[in-house]
Each structure stands twice: as structure tokens, then as C-alpha cells.
Amino acid sequence: MKKLAPSILSADFARLGEEIRAVEAAGADLIHVDVADGHFVPNITVGVPVVEAIRPITALELDVHLMIAAPERYLDAFMDAGGDIITVHAEAGPHVHRLIQRIRERGKKAGVSLNPGTPLSSLDHVLAEVDLVLLMSVNPGFGGQRFIRSMLPKIAALRERIDRERHRALIEVDGGVKVDNAAEIARAGADILVAGSAIFGSGDVAGAVKRLKEAIAR
Ligand code: DX5
Ligand code: ZN
């Protein structure tokens, strides 16, 4: 079953609890939390207190996407705050393997993310260790960008490799996911699709979740 992870980056932060309850009621599978620090990416978004605040208001897993430099400094804080899946960028430092070990040691699910320009070969020595690979299909930092279509063959190549080498890692695709491209992204091999502006910018959160879920189930 393909999953949908609404990214709260495009939610109305003044009504964040209601927005999360609305996507959960509409059938969302995970809540994707985009943490950006103004260093690793140009934007600054939300941090540990927001993860802490939303933890008690949803039964869904919190999928924490760390777009931050020096993630080793903050990993435990995000896990303590209630993050269930913690994803670090392969480009964020020299010790991605150590970070993954730390996340798994704490009994959490570990993800590794690749920017659009980072080759799949950077997964070589971590793919067996992770629960999730988050492929960026826009350059990270901002919601509302256009899906980079050359990421479709990258998704397919990773799908083929994971299946051939029998890894457990799920493929999550993040950036520019809309109702009209979700089906082909799922077909290319994504297990989890992140969508921010397509859901929270739509004026009809429940309808958008429903249409996206239908598209990826096809
Ligand atoms: C981008 C974030 C994404 C983003 C997706 O830096 O990692 O999760 O919020 O937003 P949309 O769906 O609007 O591209
Ligand atoms: Zn994200």
C-alpha cells in the first residue's frame, strides 16, 4: 500500500492542530515535518518545540525531515520530542552512517535523504541500514516548487536496486507532488509521497488528500 505524507510546511501555522487533525481524518498516513535551519538550506522553518507540540494531537507517525547542518547536535532532541522517523541528508556531514546507527539504537526509524543532484551511489554503504530513502524531487528548503521530472528515472533506478538487493528501505519522494503527477511517481516506485502545497494550499484539505490517495492507489 502506497502512503501519503502531508508536509505541514504549507499548513496554516496559526491553526496547525486543526490542519493536522483534518489530514488525519481525511486518510493521511504520516505527518511530514520539514525542519530547515537557514544553513543547510536557505529557509528557516520549525524545530523541536513544534514536534513536541504536535506529538500528542495525532496518532500518525511523525516523519521528521532534517534539512539542517550538523544534524548530530539535534538528533536526540527530535527523537525525545516524539519523532518516529528521523531522516538526515547524506550531504549534511561526513558521518551519515553514525547518525543512522544512533537513530536505530534509539528504536526509531532511520531515513537518509538525497538532494536532486546527489547520485544514488552515495547510498552504497548505508542502504542496508536504513528504513527509508527520501529522494528530493525539488531542491530542498521551500514548499510549492515544481517537480523535477528527471527524478522519475532516479526513483525507478532506486526501486530496481532495492528490489534486486532485497533491502527493506521504503522510497519516499518529496517535492512538487500534485494530483496530476502522483500516479506516475508512485508507478516509478515510490512507496510514500510527500505533498505540502497540493494539500494545504488547496482550500480543500480533505478533498486533496482523497484525490492524492486515489491517484497513488491506481
Ligand atoms: C521541501 C520540503 C518538502 C516540501 C514539499 O524543502 O522538504 O517537504 O514542503 O512541499 P510541496 O509539496 O509544496 O513541494
Ligand atoms: Zn520534506
Image (tube, rainbow, N blue to C red):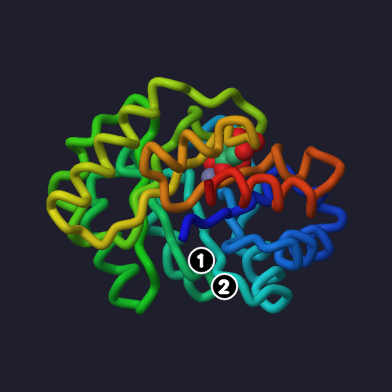
| Residue at x-position 39% and y-position 73% | 108
Q: Are marks 2 and 1 in contact (CB under 8 Å)?
A: yes
Q: Is residue 25 above or below residue 166?
A: below
Residue 111 spot, x, y in % from top left: 36, 56
- Binning the other alpha carbons within 10 Å of mark 1 as few (below 14), some (14 to 19) or many (20 upward) gives many
| Residue at x-position 39% and y-position 27% | 151
Nearer to the camera, 160 or 215: 215
Q: Is residue 89 above or below residue 5?
A: above
Q: Is residue 110 above or below residue 44?
A: below
- Binning the other alpha carbons within 10 Å of mark 2 as few (below 14), some (14 to 19) or many (20 upward) gives some
> Amino acid type of disc 2?
Ala
Residue 160 spot, x, y in % from top left: 22, 42
Nearer to the camera, 65 or 193: 193
| Residue 195 visible to an observer of this rendering | yes
Q: Is residue 185 left or right of residue 82?
A: left
For residue 81, which numbered disc appears in the image?
2
| Residue at x-position 41% and y-position 45% | 190
Q: Secondary structure at mark 1?
A: helix
Nearer to the camera, 187 or 70: 187
- Total count of labels: 2
Residue 98 spot, x, y in % from top left: 23, 60
> Amino acid type of disc 1?
Phe
| Residue 36 visible to an observer of this rendering | no
Q: Is residue 158 left or right of residue 165?
A: right
| Residue at x-position 62% and y-position 49% | 214
Residue bearing the label numbered 1: 78
Q: Secondary structure at mark 2?
A: loop
